[in-house]
């Protein structure tokens, strides 16, 4: 991925100015400490040790705590440094104002002999140049820190906006913010300032955005409206809005707008339902999805449930649908048109997406889906309750959600390209995790069933990023590099399966769950495989999207050879 623009204050050019030191550190015993920093430089550089326990870093302003971070401060070694923007944390507008300030920070849970006290220092800039050999060329990754679920994506005025779960204070999960990036071509991404920060209601978990074209919420015509889960002692739903196209968001003073007594109550996904002239929201609630409706995006009414318990329908209609081996989360729903193979007529069906962790077909996290009809009140699934359909059979495709307002009536989706079995341990440190390429889902039929496929977005066509291999019967396709590392795909036409072996694909020792066989069913005879190969990933599209497998790989160099042999 080429980073084309950085708008954050501290993403500057080099480490040459990292010469300051914290003014005083007072150790109070039992892991309690007070750090006082002068205002000469805007950044406090935090030494990180990834296997250290999280320390509580409390920003104190006017003798009151205003922000709490959870940071793995270095105990015995420093793996890397992360910046804390003091000017932003304390509301400092300019350097002249900053020089008159002293900043007080409480750090709890770090003993006096920890190595972080020697490396804690202030700085004027932060080095964001890429230090990672596995950073992708054309998949989005954050400049630094941790990223997981994509959030709040929308398309407006020729620009794709991507928000994501983000930890700016370490390359492991924690301190959930919304990061923000944008692109006009889905290949080159501009990175923007943090969009949503934690507050008194909790961390900023997953959510969605849409354009309020008719000013139903009263924030202005074409305002960008967002919802996210505030994850504190309980999970509630908060509303945000932007009047400048998503560059800056404001939090609604009436937050939280939706509450529940359920412990797992999260990941709001909302859209405008034209037939009923209302907004519809999906929420993941324990082992089911719940539907809500609203006219003004502020007052919401529960309509129905789907998946585990449905209080509006007989249990045979919607109890126990799909896989329930893990937590249901990150829902999405959209309507797709397709041509019925039997009637030759155009029809439409609704696709309900539900991400689950664990419980994926090859272990860990994955995206399941349901096909049926939605009338603005409830979803009726056409499949049998015990049947589970998966959007992507690879190990590394999770939290799949769509861009609101994608052009040409598309429902383009993007996923987090990792797996919770090993996401915190993959062999990168400056950043962790990237996104899949954007895909356009479609419906197709095979053996009397309707399935969801997903082909690469048209923006990637003719960019020279993909390779296509023709298949005639059972075959073995081997991707390799000059070091002899291999990523092997086996197509068994008799068994109608596609199997991936990445045991010799490069670095695998970071997790026993990584180098395991990965198997996908094939519903129609394969004639082609389309590959998108980047520095740490292989995305495979059989028959241009009828079967899809997304997998990470960490070779010494990018796979540059493809060999096909008959089985």
Image (cartoon, helix red, strand yellow):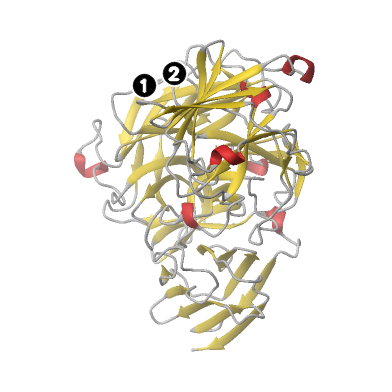
Query: Image check: 319 left or right of 30?
Result: left
In this rendering, is residue 556 above or below 206?
Answer: below
Residue with the most extreme left position: 315
Give the camera-side residue of 13 and 201. 13
Q: Residues within 10 Å of mark 2 (few under 14, many from 20)?
A: some
Residue placed under numbered mark 1 in the picture: 259
Q: CA distance from mark 2 to mark 1?
A: 7 Å
* Residue 327 drawn at (x, y percent): 33, 44
Q: Residues within 10 Å of mark 1 (few under 14, many from 20)?
A: some
Q: Which image quadrant for residue 150?
A: top right
Asked whether residue 410 appears in the rendered view, the answer is no
x, y percent for residue 29: 41, 29
Q: Is residue 345 above or below residue 257?
A: below
Which residue corresponds to the image point at 55% horizontal and 62% vertical from the top-left?
Answer: 545
The residue drawn where x is 62% and y is 14% is: 219
Image height of 440 relative to 160, above or below: below
Residue 225 spot, x, y in % from top left: 58, 24
Q: Tell me the residue at 56%/68% (across/down).
A: 543
Q: Secondary structure at mark 1?
A: loop
Reading the image, the residue beneath label 2 is 256
- For mark 2, give the secondary structure: loop
* CB within 8 Å, label 2 to label 1: yes
């Amino acid at each position: 991925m080429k980073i084309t623009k950085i708008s954050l204050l501290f993403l500057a050019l080099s480490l040459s100015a990292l010469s300051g030191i914290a003014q005083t550190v007072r150790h109070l015993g039992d892991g309690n400490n007070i750090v006082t920093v002068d205002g000469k430089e805007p950044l406090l550089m935090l030494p990180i040790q990834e296997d250290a326990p999280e320390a509580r870093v409390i920003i104190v302003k006017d003798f009151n705590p205003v922000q709490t971070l959870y940071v793995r401060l270095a105990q015995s070694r420093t793996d890397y440094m992360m910046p804390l923007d003091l000017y932003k944390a304390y509301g400092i507008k300019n350097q002249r104002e900053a020089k008159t300030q002293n900043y007080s920070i409480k750090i709890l849970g770090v003993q006096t002999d920890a190595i972080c006290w020697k490396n804690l220092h202030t700085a004027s800039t932060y080095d964001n140049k890429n230090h990672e050999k596995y950073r992708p060329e054309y998949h989005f990754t954050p400049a630094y820190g941790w990223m997981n679920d994509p959030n709040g994506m929308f398309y407006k005025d020729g620009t794709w906006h991507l928000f994501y779960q983000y930890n700016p204070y370490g390359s492991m999960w924690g301190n959930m913010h919304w990061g923000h990036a944008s692109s006009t071509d889905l290949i080159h991404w501009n990175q923007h300032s943090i969009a949503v920060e934690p507050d008194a209601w909790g961390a900023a978990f997953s959510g969605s955005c849409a354009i309020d074209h008719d000013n139903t919420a009263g924030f202005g015509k074409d305002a960008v409206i967002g919802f996210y889960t505030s994850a504190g002692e309980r999970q509630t739903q908060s509303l945000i809005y932007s009047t400048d196209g998503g560059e800056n968001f404001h939090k609604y003073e009436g937050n939280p707008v939706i509450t529940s007594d359920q412990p797992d109550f999260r990941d709001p996904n909302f859209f405008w339902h034209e037939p009923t002239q209302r907004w519809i929201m999906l929420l993941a609630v324990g082992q089911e999805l719940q539907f809500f409706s609203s006219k003004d995006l502020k007052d919401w009414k529960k309509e129905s449930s789907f998946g585990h318990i449905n209080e509006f329908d007989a249990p045979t209609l919607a109890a126990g649908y799909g896989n329930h081996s893990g937590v249901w989360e990150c829902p999405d729903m959209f309507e797709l048109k397709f041509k019925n193979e039997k009637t030759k007529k155009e029809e439409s069906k609704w696709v309900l997406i539900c991400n689950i962790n664990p419980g994926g077909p090859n272990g860990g996290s994955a995206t399941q889906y349901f096909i049926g009809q939605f009338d603005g009140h409830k979803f009726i699934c056409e499949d049998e309750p015990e049947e589970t359909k998966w959007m992507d059979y690879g190990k590394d495709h999770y939290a799949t959600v769509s861009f609101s307002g994608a052009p040409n009536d598309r429902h383009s989706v993007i996923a987090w390209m990792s797996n919770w079995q090993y996401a915190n341990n993959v062999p990168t440190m400056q950043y962790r995790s990237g996104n899949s390429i954007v895909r356009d889902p479609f419906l197709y039929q095979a053996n009397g069933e309707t399935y969801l496929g997903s082909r690469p977005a048209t923006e990637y066509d003719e960019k020279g990023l993909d390779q296509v291999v023709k298949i005639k019967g059972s075959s073995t396709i081997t991707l390799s590099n000059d070091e002899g590392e291999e990523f092997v795909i086996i197509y068994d036409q008799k068994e109608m399966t596609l199997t991936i072996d990445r045991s010799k694909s490069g670095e695998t020792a970071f997790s026993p769950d990584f180098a395991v066989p990965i198997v996908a069913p094939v519903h129609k005879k394969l004639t082609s495989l389309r590959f998108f190969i980047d520095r740490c990933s292989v995305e495979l599209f059989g028959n241009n999207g009828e079967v899809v497998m997304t997998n990470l790989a960490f070779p010494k160099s990018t796979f540059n050879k493809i060999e096909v042999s008959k089985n």
